[in-house]
Image (spheres, grey):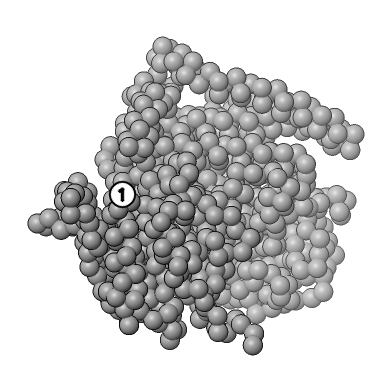
Amino acid sequence: MLSRIETFFRRLRRSLSRSVWLARLLRLPVSEGSPTRPGLIMIQIDGLAHPQFERALKHGELPFLRRLLRREHYQLHAHYSGLPSTTPAVQGELFYGVKGAVPAFSFRDHESRRIVRMYDPEVAARVEAMLSGTGNEALLAGGSAYSDNYAGGAAEPHFCPSAMGWGSTLRAANPLVLLAFLLSNFYSFVRVAVLLLLELGLALYDFVRGLVRGYDFFKELKFVPTRVAISILLRELCVIGGKIDISRGLPIIHINFLGYDEQSHRRGPRSLFAHWTLKGIDDAVARLWRAANHAPWRHYEVWVYSDHGQAAVRSYQAVQGYSLEDAVTAAFDKLGTTGLNVRPQGAGGIQTQRVRFLGGRKIQHLFSVLGINDEEAEEAHPLVAALGPVGHVYLPQDMTHDARDFVARELARTHLVPLVLSVAGPGKLCARTEAGEFRLPQDRALLLGAQHPFLDAVGEDLVRLCEHAEAGDLVLLGWRHGVAPISFATECGAHAGASPDETHGFALLPQDTPLPAREHDYLRPTDLRKAALQHLGRPDHQARAARKRIAATRTDCLRVMTYNVHGCVGMDGKLDAERIARVIARARPDVVALQELDVGRERSQGMDQAQLIARYLEMEFHFHPAMHLEEERYGDAILTHLPQRLVKAGPLPGLADKPRLEPRGALWVAVDLHGREVQIINTHLGLYPRERAAQVEALLGSDWLANEQCREPVILCGDLNALPSSPVCRRLGGQLVEAQTRAQNHRPQATFSSRLPTMRIDHIFISPALEVSAIDIPSSALARVASDHLPLLAEIRFPGGPGDTP
């Protein structure tokens, strides 16, 4: 009854949804089909390093993401960006499976021989054409992309270099539709206006601080509108667009929030202004997550990750007193080569440029691509491309190896570039520092630090970077172990290099995410790609992802769950066995007792729910049909990944004067926990007190608990349809102990109904000699909608195990 009421209100809310009506007004196609189809929303928080993420959690700047970790069974993973640690390289690996797609954010294009930057639409399109030409499947095919470097195969890219603005749909809409769009999002736009005013005030305050510190007046002034536009306007437009796409059922949606990265470049990754931006991003993630949980056409998962981190830096010019171009010129002068013109390519970083993603001719004119010399480079002159902590020096073609080595030594020893790399042979690099010459990848521990979290991978990726077809003859890094990081651009925060702060991102994923098998304990973009394809039912043919199930590693503990799954029909009216399996998987039980399962029933589309759930969990199972009508069966099951044997399955007595009552039964399985046999009995008792009393007496009789084979330890669990104070529970309590009352420092909690738990009718009873280490009643948003009951999990400890002291 409760589920039908909630289903009605969910459908009413869905029919009145602004996002649904906007999609209709804009005549956007809807991906109709089964509402249980998988969907994926990938949210990228650009530039947020793992340490800064943990700091923000600790200081309360990311309350919703902290909730995902604490209540929604999410798990935090380290995410290694690869090299260079820039968004174009990370997204090239994520969207197309190509590592090291570009050698830096700024480099010399091998066709035009000019210095290019990845926010240029033509450059981004050329690189993406190269990536798509590899034949690898585009991750975002059929979906949408927001403020990304590449479209990623998305049918609908927005605010990207290749598709600036909100795309053609909104531009082609008639004025009445645009008016409806504004009115339907009136609250959102009022909210945006208030936030814009607040952000503008902060930006002006920051502008004054910048002037006091001696920063350039015009650069500071230009940063005010770009900060407001990126941190607020672009973020809110992405949220509105993402919610519309969710209501349409697009299979995959990728949204990149740029605000933190933008602020970090200007003020530093630890600055108050950068961390202030995280609060707005956290709220944006929360709104997208709520929209995903009410999606009509798909079951969406929401993944949150950062592509890379940032390091707090000083500019090379501030440290040395002259620019990198001046250093290269001085090195050539000392070599005795005169008349060479090392042309500067600008050192302004990427601030003010990403605002161009909003589209519009005026914005494109006001914030035109800055600092790039469009003249064709002369082959006889060296060229420097240095935007951030990675620089490329392109030497004249007729330059000898000895001359190249001399310039490299001068840059490292005289001009104190932290690390100067050049190719010394296939898979080998010569690395020069102020202290001398080294070899990579052999000397990676000396140059990068033995404690680098991704030491081996960084060593390999440095070789790949230097061997890139568009890399410079000399590759300059602004960091090595033991040296404070610098940037060759004018900025306070930077990324692209190999330092831990730059390469150490994070990934926040549901615990049951199908991650691929790998030798390392961190993720990199290819791992996220494989997991995403697997989740969407498009597995990578090279490597199939596998769920990481936590087995019972301790011999003295067993995690037991009881769960009434309501025929796998949720509170939203959706029939979804996989959703039930996800709830179970995130709790990581060793043994699962399920009630109200359908097998071959017309009402559940003929599916074998016990088998489907067991297959998802990689467990074996035994099913007992309490009701068997022709080909249709309905009953209970026990699932486990431990060795087990079926002892007994049979009916329980009903009431002779009420022959039409739902039949009830019990299932008894013996589980082997590292040589100790544990008796598990699963049951689902009737609705009438007299019926339950008769069934409990049967369970306590010689066929079940009093059977000579039913030797301790014993665990009886299930939906008893009885409160703890009922005669049924008191009768069972004469021989067994209820787990919720046995657990220390635990207040017993209700499990029914899932939306508003007020009744404690699901129970786990254990032998008196057993102990309860922990009780968990998963109450995540997924658990609250998957069934009308919440699952009950008990971690049961067996005295005499290796954890005990004599």
Looking at the picture, does residue 407 appear above or below residue 566? below
Q: Which residue is mark 1?
A: 687
Query: Where is residue 591, by image quadrant?
Result: bottom left
Residue in view at x 68 percent, y 75 percent: 444
Query: Where is residue 380, by image quadrant?
Result: bottom right
Residue in view at x 42 percent, y 44 percent: 753
Q: State the quadrant of the C terminus.
A: bottom right
Percent of width and height locating residue 701: 31, 72
Residue with the most extreme top position: 176
Percent of width and height locating residue 718: 37, 60
Res 89 seen here: no
- Pick whichever, 476 or 579, lies toward us: 579
633 left or right of 232 in image: left
Amino acid type, callout 1: Leu
Q: Secondary structure at mark 1?
A: loop
Q: State the quadrant of the N terminus.
A: top left
